[in-house]
């Protein structure tokens, strides 16, 4: 089992939206490294930290799990979508996604708290210049965040 931090803008899909919908397609990833994580490394059942980004107070807002294997992101073919990619072809899609099942809302664990936790010093999201929407999380980082959220280790 692996663990991931996946960023979502709450005005697009928040942890509340995801819990209400039960399963959400993780559309719109347009970074090759993040795409490759979904395509090559993610497996059904992997743990996900649901992270709110591009908002007043970014941070970890809940827990989720990978709910599907990777498949083509349909938004790349939709000319009306902001995620449309005219260079992507149906027979050779560039962009893929996974479905994510939200499992629990947590208290917001903001960036300042993450930075103030020594056990998380190596988390990719805390490194300067990191803009990836999906990053791997170590099992120890996962457990530390569960503890910060007041959940069992």
Image (spheres, grey):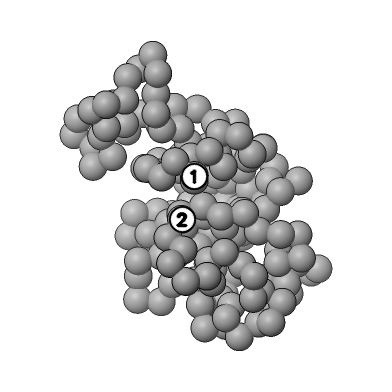
Label 1 residue SS: helix
Residue ID at (34%, 54%): 12
Using the image as rendered, state which of residue 60 and residue 89 is in the foreground: 89
Q: Can residue 114 be seen in this view?
A: yes
SS class, disc 2: loop
Residue nearer the viewer, 85 or 63: 85
Q: Which residue is drawn at 81% across and 68% down?
A: 153
Q: Mark 1 points at which residue?
A: 33
* Residue 150 visible here: no
CB atoms of marks 2 and 1 within 8 Å:
yes
* Residue 122 horizontal/vertical position (percent): 64, 70
The label shown at residue 132 is 2
Residue 70 in percent (x, y) is at: 54, 31
Give the residue drawn at x 71%, y 59%. 138
In percent of width and height, residue 3 lies at 67, 53
| Residue 140, horizontal then vertical, whole percent | 76, 65
In this rendering, position of residue 22 left or right of residue 136: left
Q: In this view, does 138 lie above or below 99?
A: below
Q: Earlier in the sequence, mark 2 or mark 1?
A: 1
Residue 29 placement, left or right of 80: right
Residue drawn at x 32%, y 33% is 75
Q: Which mark is residue 57?
A: none
Left or right? Give the position of 23 relative to 138.
Answer: left
């Amino acid at each position: 089992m692996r663990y991931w931090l996946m960023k979502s803008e709450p005005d697009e899909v928040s942890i509340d939206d995801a819990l209400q919908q039960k399963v959400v397609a993780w559309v719109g990833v347009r970074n090759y490294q993040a795409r490759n994580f979904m395509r090559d490394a993610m497996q059904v059942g992997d743990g996900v930290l649901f992270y709110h980004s591009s908002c007043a107070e970014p941070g970890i807002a809940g827990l989720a799990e990978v709910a599907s294997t990777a498949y083509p992101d349909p938004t790349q073919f939709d000319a009306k979508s902001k995620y449309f990619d005219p260079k992507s072809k149906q027979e050779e899609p560039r962009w893929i996604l996974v479905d994510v099942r939200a499992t629990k809302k947590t208290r917001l664990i903001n960036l300042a708290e993450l930075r103030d936790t020594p056990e998380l010093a190596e988390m990719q999201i805390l490194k300067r210049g990191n803009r990836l929407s999906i990053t791997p999380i170590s099992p120890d980082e996962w457990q530390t965040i569960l503890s910060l959220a007041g959940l069992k280790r």
